[in-house]
């Protein structure tokens, strides 16, 4: 893909380069384009929720296919002259007052600000077959896919403390929930009591693999003992790993989540990373954000970036004007001498001077 195809003149500096074209990145790009910022979205085309058949929780768009949602969002960004291109960003570094975004094909793109919305990778437990069924009948989020498994036989794979909480969450949706202890360790006494009171079954032993019927539907899990337990869906707790390795040159390492859920970029509430000119939004910084929350964080970060650019533009204008023949101070003095205490021309209209003919 040539520079011309990217719509980029030689040496062009974009107001904002957004790295990642999911809902957070596209929401940010739409917001920025609508306030007439030049914005380029670089997307490698690997959306996290691509395996899922539908995205849920979006007002007026509940149940939309994830790829269709992105297609519509891209059209909206493009309608305001935002640019979206394909590419894999391998590094970001500072070069004077600009940020240089480098892609794996050797391309260099200059930006005043960079917004990172690359999302995360779901590292699944090491049970054969999980990855192939991820987003279909192997799930993790009750708010994303819970309704679709209501009153189904739901299994929860225990790999850590989250499994107990997942069992409680999915018990709200189904009366047939089974917690497989797997490698997650034993439960505390109070946890056993809660599960028993709610009618959640508990099965000891490691899960070896999955049973799938001739309609390519999950039908059960098979334990190391050889026993098979019927389930229609299996809930797991992935380790969430932010896609942020390309920021190492800026000194932006990922940080372990306080709840042990994975690693993320740490930002303030507006998405500022602490490195000048660099923001982040979506799952790369909020590991638990669903589609609506990720979109909102992109919009919030875009507004913060725009205000930062407005401040920089105003300072640059003052500096440029200071070298002119008619400075701001001179204009203020001229206005004072001509207008005196008047702040506008309404006084002369409402209170005409005697003899003025008004």
Image (cartoon, rainbow, N blue to C red):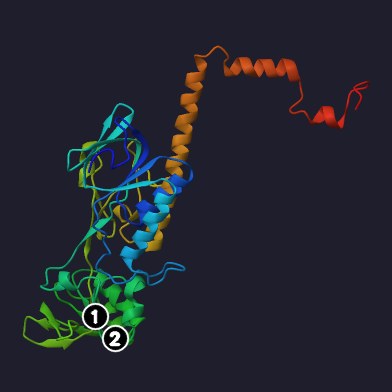
| Residue at x 26%, y 86% (from the top left corner) | 153
Residue bearing the label numbered 2: 152
Q: Inspect this view and state whether residue 269 appears.
A: no
Which image quadrant is residue 345 in?
top right
CA gap, disc 2 and disc 1? 7 Å
The circle drawn on residue 206 is none
Asked if marks 2 and 1 touch (Cβ < 8 Å), the reply is yes
Badge 1 element: strand
| Residue at x 74%, y 28% (from the top left corner) | 344
| Residue at x 74%, y 17% (from the top left corner) | 338
Q: Position of residue 149 (x, y in %)?
A: 31, 81
Q: Earlier in the sequence, mark 2 or mark 1?
A: 2
Decide: few, some or many residues near mark 2? Use Cα within 10 Å; few <14, some 14-19, many ≥20.
Answer: some
Which image quadrant is residue 239 in?
bottom left
Q: Inspect this view and state whether residue 305 appears.
A: yes
Decide: few, some or many residues near mark 1? Use Cα within 10 Å; few <14, some 14-19, many ≥20.
Answer: many
Badge 2 element: loop
The N terminus sits in image quarter: top left
The circle drawn on residue 233 is 1
Q: Position of residue 116 (x, y in %)?
A: 31, 47
The C terminus sits in image quarter: top right
Q: Nearer the viewer, residue 295 or 124?
A: 295
| Residue at x 29%, y 31% (from the top left corner) | 10
Query: With 341 as the anchor, is 126 left or right in this view?
Result: left
When the figure is inspected, residue 342 is found, relative to residue 157, above or below; the finding is above
């Amino acid at each position: 893909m040539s520079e011309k195809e990217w719509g980029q003149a030689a040496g062009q500096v974009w107001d904002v380069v957004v790295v990642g074209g999911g809902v957070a990145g596209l929401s940010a790009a739409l917001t920025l384009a609508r306030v007439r910022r030049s914005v380029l979205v670089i997307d490698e085309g690997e959306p996290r929720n691509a395996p899922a058949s539908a995205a849920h929780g979006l007002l007026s768009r509940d149940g939309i296919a994830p790829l269709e949602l992105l297609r519509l969002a891209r059209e909206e960004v493009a309608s305001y002259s935002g640019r979206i291109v394909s590419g894999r960003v391998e590094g970001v570094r500072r070069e004077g007052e600009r940020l240089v975004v480098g892609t794996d094909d050797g391309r260099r793109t200059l930006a005043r600000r960079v917004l990172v919305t690359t999302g995360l990778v779901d590292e699944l437990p090491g049970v054969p077959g999980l990855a192939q069924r991820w987003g279909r009948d192997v799930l993790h989020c009750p708010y994303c896919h819970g309704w679709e498994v209501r009153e189904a036989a739901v299994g929860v794979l225990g790999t850590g403390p989250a499994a107990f909480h997942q069992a409680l969450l999915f018990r709200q949706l189904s009366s047939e929930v089974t917690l497989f202890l797997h490698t997650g360790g034993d439960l505390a006494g109070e946890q056993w009591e809660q599960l028993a009171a709610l009618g959640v079954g508990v099965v000891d032993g490691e899960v070896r693999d999955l049973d799938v019927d001739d309609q390519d539907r999950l039908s059960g899990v098979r334990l190391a003992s050889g026993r098979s337990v019927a389930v229609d869906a299996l809930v797991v707790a992935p380790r969430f790993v932010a896609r942020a390795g390309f920021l190492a040159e800026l000194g932006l390492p990922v940080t372990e989540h306080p709840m042990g859920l994975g690693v993320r970029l740490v930002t303030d509430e507006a998405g500022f990373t602490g490195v000048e000119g660099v923001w982040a939004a979506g799952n790369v910084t909020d590991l638990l954000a669903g589609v609506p929350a990720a979109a909102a964080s992109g919009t919030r970060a875009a507004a913060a970036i725009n205000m930062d650019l407005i401040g920089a533009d105003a300072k640059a204008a003052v500096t440029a004007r200071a070298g002119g023949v008619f400075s701001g101070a001179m204009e203020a003095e001229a206005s004072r001498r001509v207008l005196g205490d008047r702040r506008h021309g309404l006084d002369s209209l409402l209170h005409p001077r005697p003899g003025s003919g008004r």
